[in-house]
Image (tube, rainbow, N blue to C red):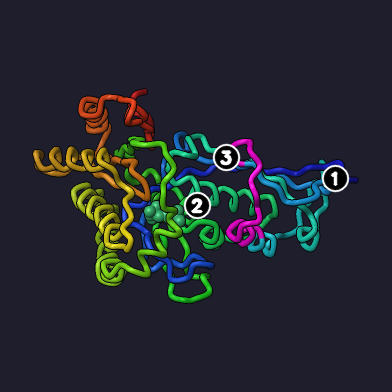
């Protein structure tokens, strides 16, 4: 019978890198030139919800993003779908009278519906949550018997940073040594309970889409920036060790210094690229100055900042008290105007307003 539909829904938060990934050694497999470390946000605030469905009545693979149909023909989607399909197992649902054998998955078609609970256009790493969620949901639907690490290596082929969203807490993406990608995967360093005093606040400086995609930005940096070569070889390996230590010991001072320095170096690499890439704007720079001034007026740093391929600030406060002070200061120094979207604060962590 063609009547049945089998479906799975999954929810995956986005992640923010504190030691950045910037630069690929293989563009097709998405293999990076350095390790990176990120923190996965609380699923309540910035996450993707994806439902995947299979039915003999579906005639082709189709996908809808926030209710609008998008094309699945891109290489990144095709790679993820192929990798998952090749690992599918038998699925039997007696209640529905569904019996799918391993070989049937090659012929069956999928319908995929994905929603972001945050503005997709806001330049807030939506692809990380998106591909992680897609791979996880497909693996469940097709009864793929691989561990999360192996699944992360598949999500990586959708979007590099996506591999880190398959775990909560702090996560390391190990660049891997080989050239087939099997050892380039994510591992959890500590779970979300390990350092739950931290509060993450995202200040949406501009909701405009970024001008240079991370893919072309990385390519241009790899081709032209000498600073990037030095960073990947000499600097990041040391920072990874120091960052793991800081996280393990709840050492906010080292954590904040490393996070801010790494964000600034990533943007310095962008400036060192020819032609230069500008992801931060004046408001981003003013936020950095503000936080730096505050941190230097105290005995130890209170807030860490980090910026990805866009002007929005991700601020990490050492605790709830600091977070509420931070919100007050931000609203004082950056009153909402038609030019900025700074009235949009997204709490990436448990709401401090509750
Ligand atoms: O995974 P991509 O292609 O969206 O690249 C992400 C790059 C940064 O967000 C700037 C850094 C990172 O490690 O997430």
Vertical position of residue 107 compared to residue 44: above or below: below
Task: Check whether the beta carbons of the residues at disc 3 and disc 1 lie within 8 A of each other.
Answer: no
Q: Which residue is mark 2?
A: 166
The answer to which of marks 1 and 2 sits earlier in the sequence is 1
Q: Nearer the viewer, mark 3 or mark 1?
A: 3
**Residue 353: x percent and y percent?**
34, 24
Task: Check whether the beta carbons of the residues at disc 3 and disc 2 lie within 8 A of each other.
Answer: no
**Residue 46: x percent and y percent?**
46, 38
* Image point (33%, 35%), residue name: 203
* 66 in magenta: yes
Q: Which residues are magenta?
A: 65-81
The answer to which of marks 3 and 2 sits earlier in the sequence is 3
* 169 in magenta: no
Q: Which residue is mark 1?
A: 97
Residue placed furthest toward the right: 1
Residue 182 visible somewhere in the drawing: yes
């Amino acid at each position: 019978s063609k009547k049945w539909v089998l479906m799975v829904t999954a929810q995956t938060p986005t992640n923010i890198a504190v030691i950045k990934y910037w630069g690929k050694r293989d563009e097709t497999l998405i293999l990076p030139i350095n390790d990176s470390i990120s923190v996965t946000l609380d699923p309540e605030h910035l996450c993707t919800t994806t439902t995947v469905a299979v039915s003999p009545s579906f005639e082709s693979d189709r996908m809808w993003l926030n209710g609008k149909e998008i094309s699945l023909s891109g290489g990144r989607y095709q790679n993820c779908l192929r990798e998952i399909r090749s690992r599918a197992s038998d699925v039997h649902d007696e209640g529905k009278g569904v019996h799918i054998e391993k070989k049937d998955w090659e012929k069956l078609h999928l319908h995929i519906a994905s929603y972001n609970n945050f503005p997709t256009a806001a330049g807030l790493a939506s692809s990380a949550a998106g591909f992680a969620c897609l791979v996880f949901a497909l693996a469940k639907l097709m009864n793929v018997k691989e561990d999360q690490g192996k699944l992360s290596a598949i999500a990586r082929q959708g979007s590099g940073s996506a591999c880190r969203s398959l775990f909560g807490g702090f996560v390391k993406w190990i660049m891997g040594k080989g050239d087939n990608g099997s050892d380039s995967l994510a591992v959890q360093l500590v779970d979300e309970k390990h350092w739950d005093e931290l509060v993450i606040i995202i200040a949406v400086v501009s909701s405009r889409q970024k001008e240079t995609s991370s893919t072309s930005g990385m390519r241009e940096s790899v081709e032209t920036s000498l600073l990037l070569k030095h960073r990947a070889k000499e600097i990041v390996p040391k920072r990874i060790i120091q960052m793991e230590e800081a996280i393990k010991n709840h050492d906010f001072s080292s954590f904040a210094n490393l996070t801010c320095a790494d964000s600034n170096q990533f943007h310095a690499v962008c400036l060192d690229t020819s032609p230069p890439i500008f992801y931060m704007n004046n408001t981003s720079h003013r936020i950095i100055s503000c936080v730096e001034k505050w941190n230097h007026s105290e005995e130890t740093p209170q807030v860490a900042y980090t910026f990805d391929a866009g002007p929005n600030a991700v601020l990490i406060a050492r605790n709830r008290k600091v977070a509420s002070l931070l919100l007050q200061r931000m609203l004082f120094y950056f009153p909402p105007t038609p030019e900025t979207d700074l009235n949009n604060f997204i709490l990436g962590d448990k709401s401090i307003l509750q």
